[in-house]
Image (tube, rainbow, N blue to C red):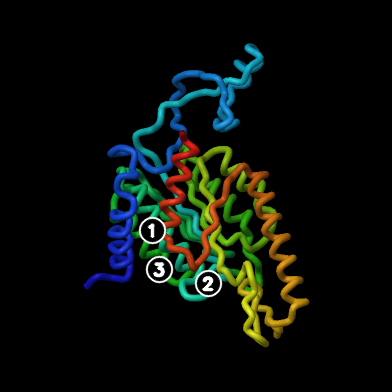
Amino acid sequence: MATASDRLLRRLEWRLGRRLDGRLHGAYRTLWHGSGIDFTDLRAYTTEDDVRHIDWNVTARLDEPFVRQYTEDREMTAWLVVDRSASMRFGRAAGKESVATELAVALGRLVARGGNRVGAILYDNGSHQVVPPRAGRDQVLRITRELLRTPAAGVPGATTDLAAMLRLAASTTTQRRSLVFVMSDFIGEQDWDRPLARLTHRHEVVVIRVVDPAELELPDLGLILVEDAETGEQLLVDTSDPLLRGRLAAQVGAREEALAEGMRRAGVDAHRITTDQDLLATLVDMVRRSGRRRR
């Protein structure tokens, strides 16, 4: 009898095959490319280039920016860093945790199709699990099983330490340059931009922020009891109060601006996925955007 992890992986494989076949770039290449490790040549800098690849010695001698080119590895290692804290269990219909799980499995299978290795870091405050990278469908199935398990209880009453999650990712992925997917709602302590920048300095990082529409615009449900998923604090609020809705909208705007600024400081373009979106359509759009950036 097929397990829940088997059924989920098979369903996503079928949908991936229909939606993404023809978008893969060769038999072994993946949709996102690392820089490789073998230097091959220099060329003049263009506005689409990553500034981290500028050769400053050559630039200083010629008084014109030049970038280093590298041979792309035929095989690569990808890491799935998944936030499994209490706030990720919030959401109507398919909650944020469910969306992050399906997205991680889809990305893992997509990367593994080219014979690449996939590993995972599943994080909650006070507990984490590391699945070492390996190749093959069985590895993706193992990650799927771990993602479907109920996460161990984190530190009660504590907000998510996103900086600790990113430092864990940096210390775990030290062996070689990798492709790192970070999936989180980014609700927690706000000192994550520097650890994210350090992770980005070493690896190609794709940040995927999972949010629920109710976190962006408060639904008018009358008088309700709300609970902070991270701290457990409860509060009775009137969601139809225009003053309350105005204050919350201002707070959401300020939070979104602060998140965007933190991503800019870290040098990352974050993808935002809401729980009511078509997951595979969003993944296809990410592939398209990645392809345009490479060209």
Asked if residue 291 is positioned above or below residue 71 in the image, the reply reads: below
Observer-nearest residue: 139 or 236?
236
Does the CB distance between marks 1 and 3 fall below 8 Å? no
Image location of residue 192, percent across then percent down: 65, 52
Residue nearest the observer in this picture, 207 or 45 = 45
Indicate the quadrant where residue 233 lies: bottom right
Cα–Cα gap, marks 1 and 2: 17 Å
Sequence-first tag of 2 and 3 = 2
Residue under numbered circle 2:
89
Q: Amino acid at mark 2?
A: Arg
Instruction: Determine the secondary structure under disc 3.
Output: helix
Q: Residue furthest top?
A: 61
Q: Are marks 1 and 2 in contact (CB under 8 Å)?
A: no
Q: Quadrant of residue 46?
A: top right
Q: Residue 262: image x %, image y %?
A: 67, 50
Dot label at residue 278? none
The residue at the far front in this view is 242
Which residue corresponds to the image point at 28% horizontal and 62% vertical from the top-left? Answer: 10
Give the residue number, with chain letter if any, for mark 3.
148
Residue type, mark 1 in image: Val
Residue ranking furthest to the bottom: 223
Q: According to the image, label 1 marks what residue?
A: 105
Q: Residues within 10 Å of mark 3 (few under 14, many from 20)?
A: some
Residue 163 image point, x, y percent: 63, 54
Query: Identity of the amino acid at label 3?
Result: Leu
Foreground tag (2 vs 3):
2
Q: Earlier in the sequence, mark 1 or mark 3?
A: 1
Instruction: Report the side of 30 relative to 158 (left or right).
Output: left
Residue 267 sits above or below residue 276 on the image: above
